[in-house]
Every structure is written in C-alpha cells, then in structure tokens.
Image: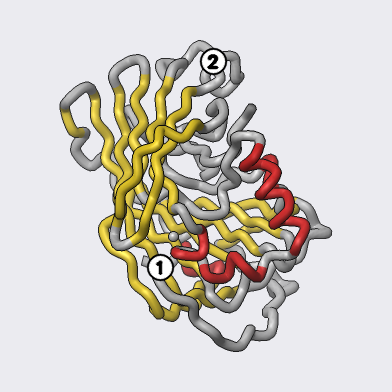
Amino acid sequence: MKIPIITAALVSLLAFSAHAQLLQKITGKKKAAEEVPATPDPKLIIGGDEAVRIDSAYEYDWAVYQESEAFQGNQRVIDGGEDIVIYYSSTQAAFNIQLKSRSTGTKYYFFGDFEKESQLKLAGVAGVASGDKSKLELEGMEPVYPGEIGYLSELRRTGSKKVIAGVACEEYVAQNLRHDPRVVNTSHTKVTAYVWIPLDPHSVFPGYSLMPEHFKLQIERMRREGSYPPVVMPLEMFLEYGNGDKVFTHTTHIIIKERRKVDLGDINRP
C-alpha cells in the first residue's frame, strides 16, 4: 500500500524540486482566523484550488528542530542536506514544516490545517515564493520533508524502540514501490527507509486531539492497514538508495512553549 509520507528530491545528489513532533499538554485560546488578503503580495503567489480557505498567519507553540545530511557512499556531501523546523500547535489542529536547503538556499514551507481541511505548499528563493493550496486529504498528503519516501510500500514495525529528544519512538522499515513513475529510470529506483515515529502522536503534537472526528477515524483505519498518515513527522529517518546514496535526518532538540506566529510571507524573509 502506498505511504503518503514525504516527497522531495536531491540537489547534486540531493536537491529538491520546487515542491517542495513533546511531553505535556498546553491549553489556550484559539485565535480568530486571518484570511489571506484579497490583494496578493507580488513576491508571494499562491495558486491552487480557489475554494480552499487558508489563513495569512498561524500560531504555534511547540517546535522540533532537525537537520538532514546527505552522503554519497560513506562520503558526506559538503553543503548537502537541509535545516528543518517543525511547528505544532497545542490549541489548534495545525502544524507547519519549514525546510531550507543548504546547497541552494531555497526554502520550503508546508502548512497543514485540519480545521479548515486545507494544506499549502510553498517554495521560495531570493525573496520570491510561490505555491499551491489544496484540500487536505490524508491519502494523498505529502508534506515537504527530506528524502523521497512518499511512494514507499507499507511501513512495517521492527519491534525496536528508543527515546529521541525525550520522546518514546518505535522503528518502522519500508521499501519503495519500484514501478512508481517518480523513480522509474532514476538512480533512486530502489530505496530502503528506516523511520522512527513517536509512539504517541500527542507527545509532539498536542493539537492532534482537536482534529475533526472523521480525520481521527481515517488515521486509525490507515494504521490498521499498514500505512502511516503524515500528521506527525518522524524524529529520525535513514534512507539508503540502491546506488549508495544516503540521507540521514535527525532531531537536534525539541522546545516546548515556544510561541511563534508564522506569516505566509516569512518564507521571503532572510
């Protein structure tokens, strides 16, 4: 079964295409929605489904900081990989992934809003960004994130468990569907992924409990069928490709109660 977890591509060996989780529950008041202005910012162009509603800014209070490194065989790729921060909310069912490529400086933002059932993907470089908004559907949801595992076969529990940055996680392993058109005739036709996922999604995403009921039911069904919906990002992940390329993503630290307001236009700021 297809796992819609993550989509990205490599620069040199790991450059992205332009498409581009701790421990306690916090209470708070939900802010009024801020709709995207009618007059668009000329340096931020958002297309996609016009019927989908998104806000111009979101507030988060939990942050997971991560880094990814790229290897060609055993040799680390200089300036390869990405700097990553994942923001989660304790007062809303919403999260945001921010990723910056070290090799190109390109930024990638992903916003997931379960209340409005919307998602937004942005890519920006040199002060100009564009993206698309669409209806949030778990079956085809692929947040920007290091690696190319959005086309993997079902994740299988290995039974291994460990604590990462204070969060209990369990390991899954998966391989890609080799007939997927995104990897056919590429150097990454074969990939094995070792993915460490929090045992309890609430341990990194308190607002998880605020999702509409139909999403919760769908998530449970997907888990029973062997897939993992991309609602809480892995805390560690190792991808090994058939040609010897590797991508290692790890969590550096997790901060609780870090309040942050993220404007869509932040992607164009230094």
Position of residue 55 measured from the top left corner of the image (x, y, whole percent): 66, 72
Residue 193: x, y in percent? Answer: 41, 30
Circle 1: element type = loop
Q: Nearer the viewer, mark 2 or mark 1?
A: 1
Q: Residue at x 76, y 65 (%)?
A: 53
Mark 1 lies on residue: 22
Residue 133 appears anywhere in the view: yes
Residue at 56%, 20% in the rendered image: 177
Q: Which residue is mark 2?
A: 178
Residue furthest out toward the top: 185
Which callout, 2 or 1, points at the residue further toward the start of the chain? Answer: 1
User: Image quadrant of residue 94?
Assistant: bottom right
Give how far across and how far down residue 205 sits, in percent: 50, 65
Note whether 265 is above or below 226 in the view shown: below
Say which amino acid is labelled 2. Answer: Arg
Name the residue rendered at 56%, 48% in the picture.
230
Please, what secondary structure does the residue beneath circle 2 have?
loop
Q: Tell me which colouring the rendered structure shows.
A: secondary structure
Q: Is residue 59 above or below residue 83?
A: below
